[in-house]
Amino acid sequence: MSYLNIRDEKLIPVVVELNSLLANYHIYYQKLRNFHWNVLGENFFDLHNKFEELYTDARTKIDEIAERILTLRYHPMSKLSDYLEIAEIKEVSPLQSDKEMVQNILKDHGILLQQLSNVVEKADEAKDEGTIDLIGAYIRELEKSSWMLDAWTKKTSEKLNQEIIAS
């Protein structure tokens, strides 16, 4: 039992999922840096800035996830080799078109959103409200970034669902 009033056996699954999230965020962060440096074409200015915004946000989240693991009284993973081994997000070549880069990032967002959900599920089982609160905000922010990047990939002639949903 700790100052958190959560038994260690309840926290271990939360920490495992947080470490997986940490690994994925590290690979995602580096991929964003890679794309930031290597994007070319007419969308250079937009994407160069967007990738920097995303990797700056990812860097902050990496620190917060590691600090959350420490708050739960465990050591966060910290070796790049471990991140590469367990992360679902994979390294890719920088030699991609701007559109391929954005599609790749959207794919990574899907992986991150699934991992975030896994963390929330385990934290809920442990009654770990601090982790749930932290991760809930990450989900909201990542969904918004995903919507914006997805909108960027669309043609102006494409439309959203035309159905108006009312109560």
Image (cartoon, rainbow, N blue to C red):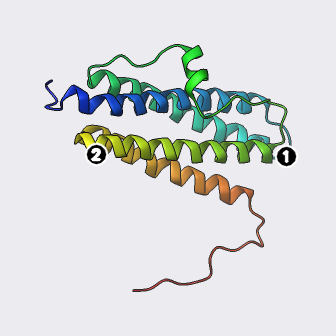
* Residue labelled with disc 1: 42
Where does the image place residue 27, in percent across and percent down from the top left?
A: 61, 28
- Quadrant of the frame with the C terminus: bottom left
Give the residue displayed 67% in from the left and 31% down from the top. Answer: 90
**Which one is in front, 48 or 103?**
103
Give the residue displayed 40% in from the left and 29% down from the top. Answer: 16
In-image side of 59 versus 69 (left or right): right
Give the residue displayed 31% in from the left and 38% down from the top. Answer: 131
Where does the image place residue 30, in percent across and percent down from the top left?
A: 64, 26
**Which one is in front, 150 or 112?**
112
Where does the image place residue 119, in percent across and percent down from the top left?
A: 39, 40
The residue type indicated by label 1 comes to Glu
In-image side of 124 versus 62 (left or right): left
* Residue labelled with disc 2: 124
Q: Secondary structure at mark 1?
A: loop
**Which one is in front, 127 or 60?**
127
The quadrant in which residue 2 appears is top left
Disc ID at residue 58: none
